[in-house]
Image: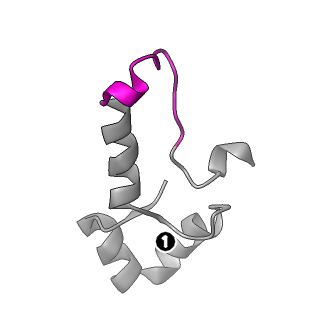
Amino acid sequence: MVVAGTPLIDNAMKNYPGLIEPYIADIPAGRPARVDEVARVIVWLCSDDASFVNGHSLAVDGGQTSK
């Protein structure tokens, strides 16, 4: 998964676009995730709204596992 907004990925996208582009091209959503998108999933999982969710792996990957 590629998450834009992190120092590592932002640096790679800016300075080494050829290195990161194949990873982004592999994402069915057509773009990297944003930090806030991943964070909202984590916050939801930690909330009472997800109190009955357990023993589940939730892919936050823009559709990569569904390919």
67, 40: nearer the viewer = 40
In the image, is residue 40 above or below residue 14? above
Kind of residue sitting beneath label 1? Ile
Residue 50 counted in the magenta span: yes
- The stretch of residues the image draws in magenta is 47-59
Q: In the figure, residue 50 lies in which quadrant?
A: top left
**Left or right: 65 in relation to 55:** right
On the image, the x and y values in percent for residue 52 come to: 45, 16
**Left or right: 19 in relation to 48:** right
27, 50: nearer the viewer = 50
Residue farthest toward the right in the current orientation of the protein: 67
Residue farthest toward the left in the current orientation of the protein: 7
Residue at 40% across, 43% down: 41
Residue at 46% across, 82% down: 17
On the image, the x and y values in percent for residue 22 come to: 59, 70
On the image, the x and y values in percent for residue 40 come to: 36, 48
Residue farthest toward the front in the current orientation of the protein: 49
Mark 1 lies on residue: 20
Residue at 55% across, 70% down: 31
Q: Main secondary structure of the magenta part?
A: loop
**Left or right: 40 in relation to 52:** left
Residue at 31% across, 40% down: 43
On the image, the x and y values in percent for residue 13 come to: 40, 78
